[in-house]
Amino acid sequence: MTRSARVRLGAGVVVTSAAAIAIGLYVGVALRRLGHPYELEWLEGGALEHVRRVLHRQTLYPPPSVEFVSYTYPPLYFWVSAAVAKVTGLSFLPLRLVSLVSSLATMGVVGRAVRVETGRWWPGAVVAGIFAAAFRATGAWYDIARVDSLFVVLLVAGLLAAVRAASWRAGLIAGVLVGLAALTKQTAALAAVPVGVYLLVRRPRVGVAFVGSAFALAGGVSLGLNISSHGWYRFSVVDVLVGHPVERSAIVGFWGKDLAAHLWPSLLVLAVGARRLGPRWAPHLCVAGGLVGAAWVSRLHTGGYDNVLIPAFVAVLVLAGIAGARLAESPRACVALAALVLVQLALLAYSPRPQIPTARDRAAGRALVAALRAVPGDVLVMSHPYYGVLAGKAPHAQAGAAIDVLRTHQRRPRRLLSASIAGAVRSQRFDVIVFDPPEDYRAVPRDLQRYYERIPAPALGPAPVTGIRRRPTQWWRRRR
């Protein structure tokens, strides 16, 4: 073996070993969190309520009320999770299991795409490892009971399949994947636009099959849901989001604080190796543009968290993986590339301990459920309805979804929801109302104190390990 070959082999072993460690670390954290019986993130309980409604054959898109307010997502993730829940039983486990499997599938999809484009296995392994290392930078979100991981794997698989599609059948399959992604999270439609336009211009038969199948699937299902819900589906997945203000700090901050600050080594590799991406540069650039654009639009939505960055990270890493493999021709380039990979992994490094719930968190959850169970009547746990369900109480709307409706510009939905919540408060329907201050108070009428009185909290709920760090701490009891 020549000295040049030994250098290449050594560099490859170092970076793939580091990537394998990153993947192993993520899998270890996810497995530790998989069966946690309480929320890892404050909106998980509301997602679980969506799955419960699917299992009980209740609509996901009714008029908003104190009983239920839909999240602003299409239904596919809840449908898939409900199918798994029929086997495992209803808890956070099936929802997290769908997300965990989806995140691992994303690593496989991006790894294979880079391997196919470069003809080498190690760049794909490295890209998969860096994606795993980005777990905390993108919100520690890959494995939680939210729609994002299923959305990402369907979208990325569909767009990357479209790039390589040479027949209308391949375009049809890619379009179905993107259509399913759009039925999981609606920003998939935006992400697919550049690839769809490219295919229609350069490969018309493939483009027609791709766009037609995606539109027919996502549009047909959405039309049926909108008709059956008497227009509330469109309100939930489109009108609510359109009615929210723009997060102006993200207009520029997305590019610097969100992307460059976390991914500058990968961006450097991409900048240096861009000229060597070859003739497939254009379609891959369309894929990357769609993914980054969708992430940016999501970041511009007020209330967006770090999870919306996941598609943008995938885009940068895939392009950097292809460019890096083309650069790694000389021993010196291999060493420099390996150094940048290690810097990238170090930049994304995180401590696993804060991401894993502790025994204290589980004890806090048990104490809260026991305190809620001791209440003789019904309870309204504003931001955490599932804790009431665990205590044997009736389910109700989640505060985050309710506040999303209350800050839209459409008067009728706001009035319906405000009247429903106010009626429940003024009729003293709930023996106890539990708040996460101060946000939860936005959902209740201002004359709350006329009907309820503040009491010392008998138990504090568990603190989430990701997302907005909020927990139920303030109790109000019905005035006698």
Image: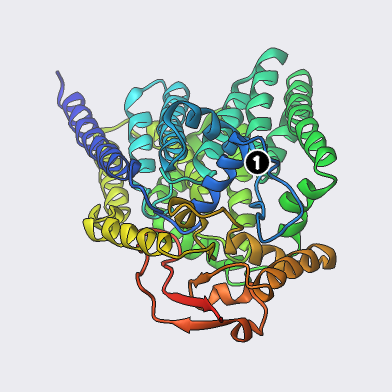
Residue 129, located in which quarter of the rendered image?
Answer: top left
Q: Position of residue 435 (x, y in %)?
A: 50, 72
State the quadrant of the N terminus: top left
In the image, residue 244 above or below residue 391: below
Residue 341, located in which quarter of the rendered image?
Answer: top left
Residue lying at 62% horizontally and 76% vertically, measured from the top left: 442
Report if residue 442 is visible in the image.
yes
State the quadrant of the C terminus: bottom right
Residue lying at 63% horizontally and 43% vertically, measured from the top left: 185
Q: How many marks?
A: 1
Observer-nearest residue: 312 or 122? 312
Badge 1 marks a residue whose secondary structure is helix
Q: In the displayed structure, does residue 65 sit left or right of residue 93?
A: right
In the image, residue 371 above or below residue 165: below
Observer-nearest residue: 431 or 332? 431
In the image, residue 340 above or below residue 156: below
Q: Position of residue 28 (x, y in %)?
A: 25, 40
Q: In the displayed structure, does residue 405 sit left or right of residue 295?
A: right
Report if residue 407 is visible in the image.
no
Q: Label 1 belongs to which residue? A: 188
In the image, residue 348 above or below residue 287: below
Observer-nearest residue: 408 or 272? 408
- Badge 1 density bin: few <14, some 14–19, many ≥20, Cα 10 Å: many
Q: How is the image coloured?
A: rainbow
Q: In the displayed structure, does residue 423 sit left or right of residue 263?
A: right
Amino acid type indicated by mark 1 = Ala
Residue lying at 41% horizontally and 67% vertically, measured from the top left: 469
Q: Position of residue 48 (x, y in %)?
A: 52, 46
Q: In the displayed structure, does residue 161 sit left or right of residue 15?
A: right
Observer-nearest residue: 102 or 131? 102
